[in-house]
Each structure stands twice: as structure tokens, then as C-alpha cells.
Amino acid sequence: MAVDRRSGFEAVFLDPVGQSVQQRWADAAMTVGFEELPPVSAFPVIPGRRWGPGLWWSATTGRHVAAGSNAMRTQLMVLDRHPHVTGLAGRPVRLLWREERGGRVRSWVPQLFARYRDGTGLLADCPNHMEAGGDRAVKAAEAVSAACEEIGWAYRRLAPLDDVPAANLKWLAGYRHPRNAGRPGLMPAVVEAFARPRPLIEGVEAAGDPIEVLPVVFHALWQGQVTADLEAPLHERVLVGPAGWSGPGPGTAGGVR
């Protein structure tokens, strides 16, 4: 679908008191903190689906983020763990544009927004399979990509994670809250225990009582203070090493950017 670049892109979002605002996209992108905004429209509830809209507590922001599907929640986990992500929001902006032929106004609401440490942003959709949404989603992706490219941002349709890394990420996410860092001094002991790669259980026992230490190790894995291959199932003999160690594999799941 050809976009009429002369008309430009427009952004629609809710201001802090809930009023709808329409603004030139390039201006909004530079001045609006989309990561602070509520959804511009509600996530749809689809009868028969096993998982509907909900909230994800973000370890990055300390706030809840609206999520519309299980696939989106998984991508929120990936981004929430990403060291360069500083903000997250669900559906905070609607993009408007005109078709080049006929001038018909089109719109799309990307499911997810992430703010990076350098100030740039990511708009993303989280299909449960890459063909989801059909031709309309493909055409919208082309337009939103063009809008993001104009301002130095990115748009992506994020591919679903495979079952094993998704399950590992979900497990580690259960330990994302800072309370799992343990008592003072325990996290440094855990990091020291895995200063060289070793099986998980050996490092845990070296750091102290497994009942106390295991949650701290999982929190450290979530934060990236220690590393394991999340493409393989987590178990007590999985190799865990220091941050940045690439020996067992990629050490992350579904990395973005």
C-alpha cells in the first residue's frame, strides 16, 4: 500500500487526564512520553480465546503494562529483561495516514511501545503466528515502518518465541521482583559463585542454603548478572556463568534490537 507522504503521519493518544489528542506524528514522537500513557483503545476480548487482556508488572518501570494476548505478554517479558529498555506501554498511540491513491485515511494501533536508553522508540506488534492479521496487517506494517523510519525509530512484528525459551523466560519472570535479590550480601556471593561457568546446583550450594539461594540465582539470571543458555531447558545441571559469558549459547531469549 502506497502512503501519501505529502499528507504526513498523525498520532492520536490520550493525555494525562484521558482526553484524546491528535498531533503531527513527528512532533508527538519527539515530545510525548508514550511509555507513560494508557492504551489509546482497549485490547479486544475475543470469545473462545484461552487468554485475554491483562496486566504485566514491569520490573523495568515498577508499573503495570496492559497486555492483549499471551503472545504479547511473552514479548513484554523479553523487553522487560532487555538492558537497554527503560519504558514500556501497551497500545499508547494510534497512527493515521492517507493512501496515495484515493486519499483514504487509514489507521493502526501497534500493540507495544518500548523506549530505549538512547531515547529512541520501538513500536511493535506481537502476532501469535507471523501470518496473523492477513493483508491488512502487512500493509499497516509497511506504513508504520515508514513512519518510524522517518524519525529514527523502529517498527517490528515480533516473531513468537519457541516453546523452550518461552517457558524458561516465564519461569525466570516469576523471580523478576527486587524482593528476590535476597538479603544484603547474598547477590554478590551468587555472582562470585558463578564467576567461572559451573552447573547451577554446584554454584547454588557454594553460595549457601539452596532454599535461600535459588530465588536469588533466578533473579540474577533474569537481570543478566549471571548467564545461562535459555534455548535449552533449565535444570539443576545447566551451566551458569558470569554476565556476558557466551559459552553455553546465546544466553538470552528472543532478543530485540
Image: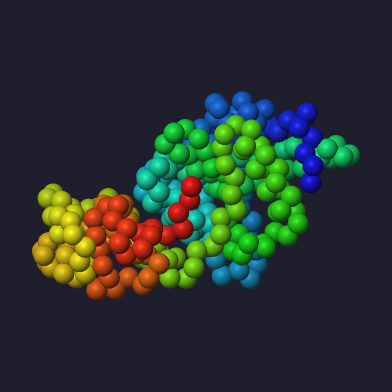
Query: Going by the image, does 170 lie left or right of 228?
Result: right
Q: Position of residue 179 (x, y in %)?
A: 25, 53
Question: Which residue is at the far front?
Answer: 247
Looking at the image, which is closer to me, 201 or 58?
Answer: 201
Looking at the image, which is closer to me, 83 or 114?
Answer: 83
211 up-or-down from 86: above or below: below
225 up-or-down from 96: above or below: below
Query: Going by the image, does 83 lie left or right of 72?
Result: left
x 32%, y 70%: residue: 234
Q: Position of residue 189 (x, y in %)?
A: 13, 55
Regarding residue 138, the answer to whether it shows in the image is yes
x 87%, y 40%: residue: 101
x 59%, y 63%: residue: 128
Q: Position of residue 70 (x, y in %)?
A: 52, 62
Regarding residue 211, the answer to whether it shows in the image is no
Looking at the image, which is closer to me, 142 or 97?
Answer: 142
Q: Count every numbered label the image shows and give the total.
A: 0
Looking at the image, which is closer to me, 174 or 162?
Answer: 162
Q: Position of residue 148 (x, y in %)?
A: 62, 38
Question: Residue 31, located in which quarter of the rendered image?
Answer: top right
x 24%, y 55%: residue: 242
In the rendered view, how is the structure colored? rainbow
Query: Going by the image, does 23 lie left or right of 50?
Result: right
